[in-house]
Image: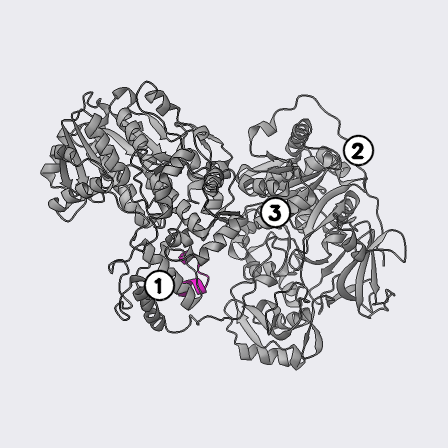
């Protein structure tokens, strides 16, 4: 079977050049509110080609990686690579990092075009591959420099590689399929002819860049002079969001998997712009096709494996038809239906489909054995034929028309009889209440050996059903329906009802490996009261209380619950209910009945329960309209006689107070401390000084005030608040809740509202200078996600707003508080901002804050005997005495007022993450360097005495695009500039420390013996 041929261009490059000239002013690309013409696409393509060629990154026949979100730059990059005679290798940024690593190494990619925010995924993968490669960031202005001189590009031949698509990763090692220009061009021209593609027609770019359907979408549009409509993944989630997107951008042509198209059926009447619907990637039911075909909408069923350049057959479905064939061969495509002896089958006889002609790939990259087994010499003509593994037959009444009958390698045995999974799915799809479905064979015994065939040991079939809206289906009803049309051994034993079927990362078809196992854990449909009682027992265990103490409405924290105790709760919940939840949610759901409802939501996959609500950080940082900012127009006091300090019962606050008492000239210092009463407040301060080995005699000079930064007017009597407003010259706001796992909604009270209340005092009665303790964490993952390697002290934190949502509640709250202070400064407030790193032990006394993340991490890894491999990470520990000395010096000299100061050790004076652990190994600690993934998995086995135990959920939670944890996001540490600080102390006795082996050795007692008991109850504490 060979369809008629028609004239074609030499390569897709020559066709695109033709389109650039002919349709210069036509609309080429739409993405969100941006529109680009073919003339702009041509100019940008030439700019990028010149830049990459000048950099030595683009040479004929080179393989170039492309890891980028859907964007205009993505389209430009593809065109630029092809015009240079190179081939592109799509790397979907949403793919798991291990998959990306394999693809980069397998394709030996030395150049990858990407965006800065994907650097932390690509860079480790390139390093792991052992290749001397480079990344080119398409979101930097240097790439798009103006043209200097026109340069000639090499000619491209039809048999040259155009792109490589990796496929078949679900059942084996991914294989790179090598596709040529002639195959791509043949597909594009056939599509333009079949669909009548022309300028003005709007085509959706839906598929992931790593799936060959994306190539089809892009070149069908570009080669016909039409408009390609792109959008973010979040905008095109199946269902309502995708329907909204299609309506908003008036999309007229879509190519979707049937499982995705089915989610749009209920919105069919609103999608009035749709003129052509193409389905492919998996079998489509007749009922779905009938729902979409109309006098105004053409419906096409497309078929083809990646190895033959996306599509080799196509069929236009008509309303009156009762079956949906996969269609006729495309032009220049040869189809052969062969039996097991490789002989041609008769019309109507089932056989395996082999494909020849222009679209056949060159084979699998560097896999000659697999290539030779799937790409055979054509016994009926020239070239190669590809063995598809698909069972088809030719329609007896319509020569050349093929029907799909299943996969030869998707057959399983049930009770000794061989069946085809697709046959069951097609029957279930005919049920009027079924929107879409998938059937999976479940083994009676789980077998881990890779040598055992995938379908070995199958004992039953499980059907996963997505009902149509408003339909109520039962397991027995569907079993009866299937039994009426299928042999008893083909009727699924179990039916699982779902809201939607999981899709592969490239959204091409159902991800069968992600279909849930049959429930092994307690049913959450059960009475929540029963679950509340069980959870109350978990609370009792975690709090070490007699069983029965906690009731369904007992508040965990009112019973003495702490951060460490939360870890025991999480362990118990996973043990008893099989559900792992983020630790921060216990703060929001503090009673057993609350947790029971939460677990139900998790079981129902309610994202609203699992994820923080979106928070508009800029709105959170707006100054109170009640602030008397007019006072800030007056200059603050030039002479400092009186100060107020918050946070003096914390590690840094106590040392700062000691430093000010020693070197300051204040006549009076107020310390605001939250306590039960005045006596308790005084005792808290004294106990803190004793704990940190600071001299208590100086405290006689301090006036302690019992107050609360979280409350209006600091919970002080009006008379006292007015007195402070008159007396205080400088405020040191050090108090903060540094808990790592509290959500923003709970930590906001201390860190945001508390800062707002301090601002009220700063604007009360007269202008006061404010010294605010921020953190280097307000910059977020600035290197990993934004590609910024050097951060000046005056760096605008607004530029980090988009990445702060990745961070935990503490960091978000500190960003909001600092942003609030920048607004206050713009209105005239004299405010200095200090950003220390992790505050480590005192250089002389070695006294440390044992709850600090740096200490917990190192100590925890020592106990584990392993540490994660982060070669570009630094912890930025900074000795507490240095931080206190620097702040005191800067705050007592008016010439430094109003500045921003990063207080840390310069990179050249600090041991890196790996160097710290290498030194500990030198000292005899048995430590093994392992991959971050393995280290994160190992956390699940920690003993309760390990200092990292309360933070297991914190470390393991995926915070960035559902694939990266907080440690992975922060795997690259920027060069934080500290020039303002170093300049200010250069002529003083203050010495910037060196975090070297000597200091690490001094800290050793803190690392390996202080976390061995359960008495350390808090991950962090409220320090004020």
Q: In the image, residue 884 lies at what x, y percent? A: 28, 31
Which is in the foreground here, disc 1 or disc 3?
Answer: 3
Specify which label sits upstream in the sequence, 1 or 3: 3
Q: Nearer the viewer, residue 788 or 17?
A: 788
Q: Secondary structure at mark 2?
A: loop
Which is in the foreground here, disc 3 or disc 2?
Answer: 3
| Residue behind mark 2 | 155
Quadrant where the N terminus sits is bottom right
| Residue behind mark 1 | 595
**Mark 1 crowd level (few <14, some 14–19, many ≥20, 10 Å Cα):** many
> What range is drawn magenta here?
597-609
User: Residue furthest toward the top?
Assistant: 987
Q: Secondary structure at mark 3?
A: helix
Q: What residue sits 55% from the left and 43% below the top?
A: 121
**Mark 2 crowd level (few <14, some 14–19, many ≥20, 10 Å Cα):** few
Q: Which mark is residue 100?
A: 3
Specify which label sits upstream in the sequence, 2 or 1: 2
Q: In the image, residue 443 lies at what x, y percent? A: 61, 72
- Magenta highlight: main SS: helix
Please check the rendered image and state whether residue 608 is part of the magenta-colored stretch, yes or no.
yes
Image mark count? 3
Among the 4 quarters of the image, the one containing residue 940: bottom left
Q: In the image, residue 334 lies at what x, y percent? A: 83, 56
């Amino acid at each position: 079977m060979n369809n008629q041929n028609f004239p074609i261009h030499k390569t897709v490059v020559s066709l695109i050049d033709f389109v650039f000239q002919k349709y210069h002013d036509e609309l080429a690309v739409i993405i969100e509110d941006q529109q680009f013409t073919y003339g702009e696409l041509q100019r940008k393509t030439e700019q990028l080609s010149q830049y990459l060629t000048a950099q030595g990154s683009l040479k004929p026949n080179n393989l170039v990686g492309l890891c980028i979100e859907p964007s205009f730059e993505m389209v430009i990059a593809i065109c630029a690579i092809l015009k240079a005679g190179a081939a592109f290798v799509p790397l979907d940024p949403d793919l798991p990092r291990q998959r990306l690593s394999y693809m980069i190494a397998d394709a030996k990619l030395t150049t990858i075009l990407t965006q800065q925010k994907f650097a932390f995924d690509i860079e480790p993968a390139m390093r792991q591959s052992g290749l001397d490669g480079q990344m080119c960031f398409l979101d930097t202005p240097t790439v798009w420099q103006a043209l200097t001189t026109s340069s000639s590009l090499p000619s491209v031949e039809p048999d040259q590689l155009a792109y490589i698509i990796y496929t078949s990763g679900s059942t084996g090692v991914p294989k790179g399929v090598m596709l040529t220009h002639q195959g791509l061009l043949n597909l594009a021209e056939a599509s333009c002819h079949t669909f009548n593609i022309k300028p003005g027609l709007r085509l959706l770019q839906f598929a992931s860049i790593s799936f060959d359907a994306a190539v089809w979408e892009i070149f069908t549009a570009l080669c016909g002079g039409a408009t390609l409509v792109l959008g973010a993944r979040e905008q095109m989630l199946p269902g309502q969001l995708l329907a909204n997107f299609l309506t908003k951008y008036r999309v007229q042509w879509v190519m979707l998997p049937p499982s995705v198209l089915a989610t749009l059926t209920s919105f069919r009447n609103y999608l009035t712009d749709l003129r052509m619907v193409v389905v492919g990637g998996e079998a489509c039911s007749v009922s779905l096709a009938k729902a979409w075909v109309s006098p105004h909408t053409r419906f096409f069923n497309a078929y083809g494996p990646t190895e033959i350049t996306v599509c080799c057959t196509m069929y236009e479905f008509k309303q009156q038809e009762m079956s949906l064939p996969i269609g006729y061969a495309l032009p220049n495509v040869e189809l052969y239906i062969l039996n097991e002896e490789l002989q041609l089958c008769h019309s109507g006889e089932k056989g395996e489909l082999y494909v020849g002609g222009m679209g056949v790939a060159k084979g699998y990259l560097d896999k000659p054995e697999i290539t030779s087994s799937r790409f055979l010499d054509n016994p009926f003509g020239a070239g190669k034929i590809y063995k598809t593994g698909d069972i088809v037959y030719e329609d007896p009444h319509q020569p050349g028309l093929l029907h799909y009958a299943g996969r030869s390698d998707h057959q399983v045995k049930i009770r000794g009889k061989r069946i085809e999974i697709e046959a069951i799915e097609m029957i279930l799809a005919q049920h009027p209440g079924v929107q879409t479905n998938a059937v999976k064979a479940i083994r009676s015994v789980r077998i881990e050996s890779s040598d055992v065939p995938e379908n070995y040991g199958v004992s039953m079939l499980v059907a996963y059903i997505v009902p149509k809206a408003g339909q109520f289906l039962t397991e027995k009803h569907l079993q009866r329906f299937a039994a009426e049309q299928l042999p008893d051994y083909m009727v699924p034993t179990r039916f699982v009802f779902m809201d939607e079927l999981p899709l592969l990362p490239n959204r091409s078809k159902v991800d069968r490996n992600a279909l849930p196992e049959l429930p092994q854990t307690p049913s959450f449909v059960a009475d929540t009261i029963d679950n509340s009682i069980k959870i109350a027992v978990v609370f009792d265990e975690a709090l070490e209380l007699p069983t029965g103490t906690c009731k369904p409405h007992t508040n965990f924290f009112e019973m003495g619950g702490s951060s460490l105790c939360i870890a025991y709760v999480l362990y118990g919940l996973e043990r008893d209910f099989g559900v792992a939840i983020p630790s921060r949610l216990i703060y929001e759901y503090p009673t057993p009945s609350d947790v029971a409802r939460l677990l139900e939501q998790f079981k129902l996959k309610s994202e609203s329960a699992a994820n923080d609500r979106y928070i508009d950080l800029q709105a959170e940082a707006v100054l109170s309209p009640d602030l008397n900012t007019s006072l800030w127009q007056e200059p603050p006091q030039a002479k400092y006689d009186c100060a107020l300090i918050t946070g003096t019962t914390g590690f840094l606050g106590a040392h700062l107070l000691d430093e000010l008492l020693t070197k300051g000239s204040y006549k009076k210092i107020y310390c605001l401390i939250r306590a039960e009463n005045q006596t308790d407040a005084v005792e808290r301060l004294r106990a803190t000084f004793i704990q940190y080995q600071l001299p208590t005699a100086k405290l006689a000079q301090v006036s302690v005030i019992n107050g609360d930064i979280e409350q209006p007017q600091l919970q002080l009597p009006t008379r006292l608040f007015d007195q402070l407003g008159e007396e205080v010259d400088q405020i040191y706001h050090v108090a903060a809740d540094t808990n790592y796992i509290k959500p923003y909604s709970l930590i906001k009270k201390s860190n945001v509202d508390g800062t707002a209340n301090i601002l009220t005092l700063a604007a009360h009665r007269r202008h006061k200078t404010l010294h605010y303790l921020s953190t280097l964490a307000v910059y977020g993952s600035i290197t990993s996600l934004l590609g910024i390697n050097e951060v000046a002290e005056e760096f605008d934190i607004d530029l980090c707003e988009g990445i702060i949502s990745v961070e935990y509640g503490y960091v978000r709250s500190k960003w909001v508080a600092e942003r609030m202070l920048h607004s206050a400064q713009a209105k005239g407030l004299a405010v200095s901002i200090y950003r220390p790193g992790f505050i480590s032990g005192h250089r002389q006394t070695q006294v440390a804050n044992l709850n600090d993340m740096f200490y917990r991490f190192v100590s925890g890894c020592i106990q584990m005997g392993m540490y994660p491999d982060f070669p570009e990470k630094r912890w930025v520990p900074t000795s507490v005495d240095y931080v206190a000395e620097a702040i005191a010096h800067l705050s007592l000299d008016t010439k430094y007022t109003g500045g921003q100061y990063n207080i840390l050790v310069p990179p050249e004076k600090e041991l890196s993450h790996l160097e710290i652990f290498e030194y500990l190994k030198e000292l005899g600690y048995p430590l093994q360097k392992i991959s971050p993934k393995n280290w994160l998995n190992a956390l699940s086995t920690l003993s309760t005495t390990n200092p990292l135990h309360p933070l297991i959920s914190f470390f393991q939670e995926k915070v960035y695009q559902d694939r990266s944890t907080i440690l992975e996001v922060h795997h690259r540490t920027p060069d934080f500039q500290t020039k303002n600080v170093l300049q200010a102390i250069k002529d003083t006795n203050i010495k910037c420390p060196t975090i070297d082996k000597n200091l690490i050795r001094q800290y050793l007692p803190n690392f390996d013996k202080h976390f061995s008991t359960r008495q350390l109850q808090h991950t962090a504490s409220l320090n004020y």
